[in-house]
């Protein structure tokens, strides 16, 4: 029997409201999910994350995926990229009138 090992980590998740839709986004794996309520969006995100984890595990491409998404490995532990700031930037949008 093959013994599976897991590594516990936490990933940043940004929660947005776009009109009547709630959105969860994580830059750690570039995953997005949405729902009609905050709870629905969280459930949808959890399901998407689980499918992502299962697929990467099935393919055996964890190291490649982690590097692609900017995770760093120190000794045997992986750390996701950290959100260091969030700012509102002024922009000019042409008038739609």
Image: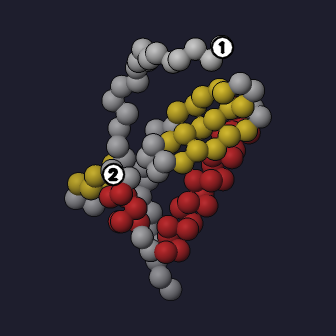
Taking depth in this image into account, of 73 and 16 the one nearest to the observer is 16
Horizontal relation, residue 40 to residue 50: left or right: right
**Disc marking residue 24:** none
Q: Residue 97's mark? A: 1
Compared across the picture, whether 60 is left or right of 14 comes to left
- Identify the residue under disc 2: 71
Mark 2 neighbour class, 10 Å CA radius: few under 14, some 14 to 19, many 20 or more? some
Image coordinates for residue 52, horizontal then vertical, percent: 56, 60
- Rate crowding at label 1 as few (under 14), some (14 to 19) or many (20 or more) other CA atoms within 10 Å: few
Lateral position of residue 27 relative to residue 53, left or right: left
Colouring method of the image? secondary structure
Q: Residue at x 51, y 37 (%)?
A: 13
- The answer to whether mark 1 and mark 2 are in CB contact below 8 A is no
Residue 68 visible? The answer is: yes
Cα distance in 3D space between marks 1 and 2: 44 Å
- Corner quadrant of residue 20: top right
Instruction: Kindly state the secondary structure of the residue where label 2 is placed.
Output: loop
Q: Position of residue 40 (x, y in %)?
A: 74, 39
Q: Nearer the viewer, mark 1 or mark 2?
A: 1
Picture quarter with the C terminus: top right
Q: Is residue 9 above or below residue 56?
A: above
Image point 72% across, 31% down: which residue? 21
- Horizontal relation, residue 36 to residue 28: left or right: right
Nearest to N terminus: mark 1 or mark 2: 2
Q: Residue at x 69, y 44 (%)?
A: 43
Residue 27 drawn at (x, y percent): 45, 43
The answer to whether residue 34 is above or below residue 38 is: below
The residue positioned farthest toward the left in the image shown: 75
Who's the residue at 58% across and 44% down the image? 32
In the rendered image, the vertical position of residue 36 relative to residue 57, given as above or below: above
Residue 77 in sight here: no
């Amino acid at each position: 029997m093959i013994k599976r090992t897991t590594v516990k980590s936490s990933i940043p998740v940004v929660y947005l409201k776009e009109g009547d839709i709630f959105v969860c986004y994580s830059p750690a794996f570039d995953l997005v999910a949405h729902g009609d309520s905050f709870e629905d969006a969280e459930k949808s995100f959890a399901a998407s994350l689980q499918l992502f984890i299962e697929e990467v595990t099935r393919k055996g491409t964890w190291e490649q995926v982690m590097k692609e998404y900017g995770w760093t490995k120190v000794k045997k532990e992986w750390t996701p990229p950290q959100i260091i700031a969030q700012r509102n930037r002024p922009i000019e949008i042409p008038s739609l009138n």
